[in-house]
Structure formats: C-alpha cells, structure tokens
C-alpha cells in the first residue's frame, strides 16, 4: 500500500474517534484541521461554516494560516468557490489566476498556490466547507479527494452532535419548525472564535451583554490594512467586534485619553479608506446608549435587571410576525378579515401584525376581567365589540395562550355571534400548561413553562414596553405547581386590583 494511503487511514481512524469523543467542538475541529493539514502534507486547512442569512462563509477554525489572512474580509459564499455550496468538490490549481477565488492577491501573499474545497453535508444541506491549501501547485488526486470527503463527513457529524446537544434544550422555537432546525452557523462560529480568555475584561463584559440580549456578534472577524510600505502592510486595524444584524463594527476603548486619540486617528484613516464600513468607538458608558439606540434600552437598568434572560429578541419577534402576516395574507386572499384583540397584552403584537397583512383588515378590541375565586373563576367581558361580527371572517389575536381557559370562553362567546369563520392567531403558545384544547391556527412561538414579560406582556403592570420577550421569576413564585396561581392572580388583578382589565 502506498505510504500516504496508510497515513490517510490512520488519520481517518483518529478523526472518527475524535468526532464521537464528546470533546468540545472547538477541540474536535482543531484536531481535524491540524491532522488533515499534516496528512495531506499541505500548508494549511480550515473549516468554514455557511451562514444562510448573510450568504457568508465564516472561518470557524484554521491551521497554518496567518491571522491577517483569516481576517482578510468576509467570504461571500457566491464568490468564493461557490460550487462547493452546490455540493461539489472544487479544486484550484493556480490560485493566482483562478477567478473562482475571492481574495486572489491575499491568497498569493499568504503563499497559497493551490487549494481544494470540499462541502460539509448534513442530511442534504450544505453547512460549510473544508478547505486545504498548499504552497506548491498540486493536482489533487482521487485518493486525496476521497480522504477529504470522509474528513468533511466526520466534521459535519461532529458539528451536528454539538448542535443537537445545544438544541435539545432550546425552546422557544418558531412553531412549526422541525425539531432540529437548520444550523445557526453564525452562533457556532461565534462560539468557536470566542477568545478564551478575552484580551481585556471590557471585551468579556461587552460580549456578555450582547449574549444577554441575544445580539449576534463576531470577535475580530476582519483586519483592515491602513498603511503600506510597497506591497507590505505596515499598519492594520482589527476592530474588536462585528454585529452582523446591524452591520456595525465596534472598537472598545478605555477612558485613557492617550489611547483614545490614537484609536481615533486609526478610525479616521479607516473611514477614509473604507467609507462603506460602519464602525463605532465605544467606552463602557456608550454600550448602554448603543443598545438603547437599537431597541434594547433605555430600560438598561432597573427593569431589565429583573429579567433573568431574554427568550425572544426584537429581531426574532419581527421576523416571525412578518411570517405570520404573510401567512394570513395568503390564506385570506380576496377577503377582509376582522382582527379582534384582547386588551391589553396584545397591543404590540396586534399593531405589528396588522401592518404585515397586505389585505384590507378591520380591527376591534375586547377587554375582560376575572371574578370568583380560583376554583370557581369566570371571565367577564367589560368591553365588548363595537359592531356585529355576523357573516365576517374573524381572527382572534392573542398575546399568549396558557391554560386556554380565557380563549375557550371567548371562542364560545364569539361563535354565538355567527361569524362566517373564526380562527386564532397567538404570538406565544405555552402548550405545556394547556387545560382546555383550543384550536390555534397561527402560532408565533412555543414557549416553556416560565413567566414571560415584554412586547405587551406584563407582570403587575410592569414591563409591557420592553421591545423583547424576557423571563422573570415573579415574587413568591417557586416551582411549577405554584406558577398557575402566580400567573392567575397576576392576570386576574388580585395582586393589584388596578391592573384589571388585562
Ligand atoms: P389562559 O386563560 O390561562 O390561557 O391565560 C391567558 C392569559 O394569561 C394571557 O392572555 C395573559 O394575559 C396571561 N398570561 C399567561 N401566561 C403569562 C405569562 O407568562 N406572562 C404574562 N401573562 C401571562
């Protein structure tokens, strides 16, 4: 047997063991790139993950490539060996001249002569690519490609394992999603490239804040050359963070004036050379202002401190409400539905949803209160509809369906008024607590058995104006069995009579 074949076998055996070892994904992928590069006698190897939303390929782990090459700029999935996203193996004999290579000049400077890109497949989906780089021109043989394909498959298995571990515990998910949704490449790449430890405590604090708000971030993903000496780069600038959702680079700074001056100089230069780049220099006080600007404050402090964690971010809610609006517009084509909301929790959802329905709609509201004790509790309508609904297509809009009792009562009440049709659209479905089976046609998210606030939902009248949905532990609230009474007494205004109607 050829010697290199024996090496390929041995490395595959080691990588197969590594893929199921239970090591962290960072360690496993680190081993993959190192051993693959060495088995192939190549100069470098990297695993790239595909972010479907931005259509970028993100460097997750690399071996043998310099820092500046990894941070050279984002790889556009449609420009960088794009056929490998179609599931093909792409080989490049001469990087210097092949138009399928996005950063030819940089690759040459890195000393790369040839490369090969093998897709990472996960049940029919392409989730990224495994790439191998060589310093001398090389024709990759059928054996090389068979070896790399097997490595790529093992890598995809390791990635999937890590995702399953994470996703088993991940609720909420958009209702209707498959149990395990498509990989979130950005989040994985973010975890893999998170420095351990961070270079500076302020970076760690900022990352923690972004994590709390579930704002996606990338750590030092790109270096910008600022000055050259001939064709050698003399000065570079690598901003600390990139926030892809708002397309913003962030450089953190302390209050030391000398440092600020130097950073400001670099920033000015960067803006001259790269005018399309959106970048901000932030000190600690500025973080909160920035978050406020993007809809995560001013709440900053008092209120948010009581929120244990964010369940659904503003952008996740926006995206889902848009999808629901589209589905309703499609299902009701040619009709003009009447949307009925139950005050007050529904106000944010109703106003966003109706603006995403491309049909003529009308809107009405009802308000209810609860009476009786917990055993004999009933619903009383304290604000009825303004007009008759007979013969109309009615959609009840709810903030959250918990036990289903309220909705059940209201559906009976409305059915007696003889609408042409009656359906329900709820933003949140706390399905695990359901006591009455109510038909829900449109569901935003399935949520766990926890008390949620924000985006219209309150606890004791507070938190309605949070732009996201967060989890709190109401006072006097211990385990799941107590939760019903806390939820109920809150909802029913028994804790604070002024709160009724909800
Ligand atoms: P159900 O009759 O038990 O389905 O209660 C539905 C109502 O309870 C909702 O319209 C809310 O007003 C309230 N509710 C239930 N769970 C929560 C929660 O987690 N946060 C805020 N309000 C809730």
Image (tube, rainbow, N blue to C red):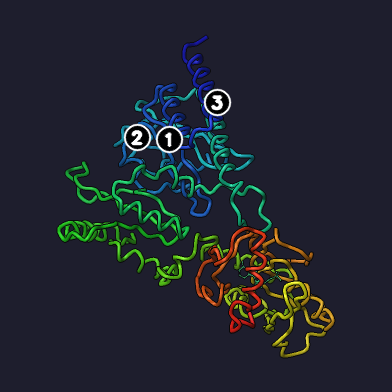
The answer to whether the residue labelled 2 contacts the one labelled 1, judged by CB atoms less than 8 Å apart, is: yes
Q: In the picture provided, is 143 more to the left or to the right than 437?
A: left
**Label 3 lies in ligand 1 vicinity (Cβ under 8 Å):** no
- Is residue 13 in view? yes
State which mark lies toward you, 3 or 2: 3
The disc at residue 65 is: 2
- Local packing at callout 3 (Cα closer than 10 Å; few below 14, some 14-19, many 20+) is some
Labels 1 and 3: the sequence-earlier one: 3
The quadrant in which the C terminus is found is: bottom right
- Is residue 336 in view? no
Labels 3 and 2: the sequence-earlier one: 3
Q: In the picture provided, is 26 more to the left or to the right than 171?
A: left
Q: Residue 496: horizontal and vertical position, in percent?
A: 58, 80
Front-lying residue, 480 or 304: 480
**Residue shown at 31% from the left, 40% from the top:** 67
**Label 2 lies in ligand 1 vicinity (Cβ under 8 Å):** no
Q: CA distance from mark 3 to mark 2?
A: 24 Å
């Amino acid at each position: 047997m050829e010697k290199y074949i024996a090496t390929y076998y041995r490395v595959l055996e080691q990588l197969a063991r590594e893929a199921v070892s239970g090591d962290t994904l960072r360690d496993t992928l680190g081993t993959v790139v190192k051993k693959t590069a060495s088995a192939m006698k190549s100069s470098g190897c990297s695993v790239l993950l595909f972010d479907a939303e931005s259509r970028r390929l993100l460097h997750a782990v690399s071996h043998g490539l310099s820092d500046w090459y990894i941070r050279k700029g984002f790889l556009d999935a449609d420009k960088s060996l794009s056929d490998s996203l179609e599931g093909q193996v792409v080989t490049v004999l001469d990087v210097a001249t092949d138009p399928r290579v996005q950063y030819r000049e940089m690759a040459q400077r890195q000393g790369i002569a040839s490369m090969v890109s093998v897709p990472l497949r996960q049940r029919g989906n392409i989730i990224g690519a495994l790439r191998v780089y060589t310093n001398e021109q090389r024709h990759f043989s059928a054996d090389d490609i068979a070896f790399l394909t097997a490595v790529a498959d093992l890598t995809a298995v390791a990635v999937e394992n890590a995702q399953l571990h994470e996703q088993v515990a991940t609720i909420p998910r958009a209702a209707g999603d498959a149990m395990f949704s498509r990989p979130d490449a950005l989040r994985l790449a973010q975890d893999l490239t998170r420095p351990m430890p961070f270079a500076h405590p302020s970076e760690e604090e900022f990352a923690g804040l972004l994590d709390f708000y579930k704002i996606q971030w990338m750590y030092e993903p790109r270096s910008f050359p600022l000055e050259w000496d001939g064709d050698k780069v003399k000065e570079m600038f690598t901003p600390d963070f990139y926030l892809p959702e708002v397309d913003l680079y962030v450089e953190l700074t302390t209050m030391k004036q000398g440092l600020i001056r130097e950073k400001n100089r670099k920033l000015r230069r960067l803006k001259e050379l790269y005018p399309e780049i959106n970048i901000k220099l932030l000190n600690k006080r500025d973080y909160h202002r920035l978050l406020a600007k993007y809809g995560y404050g001013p709440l900053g402090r008092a209120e948010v401190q009581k929120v244990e964690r964010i369940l659904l971010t503003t952008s996740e809610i926006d995206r889902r409400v848009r999808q629901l609006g589209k589905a309703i517009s499609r299902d009701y084509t040619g009709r003009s539905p009447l949307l009925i909301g139950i005050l007050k929790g529904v106000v944010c959802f109703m106003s966003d949803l109706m603006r995403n329905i491309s049909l003529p709609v009308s809107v009405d509201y009802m308000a209810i209160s609860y009476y009786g004790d917990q055993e004999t509790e009933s619903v009383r309508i304290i604000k009825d509809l303004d007009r008759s609904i007979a013969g109309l297509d009615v959609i009840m809009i709810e903030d959250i369906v918990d036990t289903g009792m309220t909705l059940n009562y209201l559906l009976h009440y409305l059915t007696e008024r003889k609408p042409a049709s009656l359906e329900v659209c709820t933003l949140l479905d706390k399905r695990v607590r359901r006591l009455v089976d109510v038909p829900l046609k449109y569901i935003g998210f399935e949520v766990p058995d926890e008390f949620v606030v924000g985006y219209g939902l309150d606890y004791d009248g507070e938190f309605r104006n949070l732009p996201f949905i967060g989890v709190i532990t109401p006072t006097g609230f211990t385990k799941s069995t107590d939760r019903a009474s806390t939820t109920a007494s809150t909802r029913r205004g028994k804790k604070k009579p002024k709160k009724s109607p909800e």
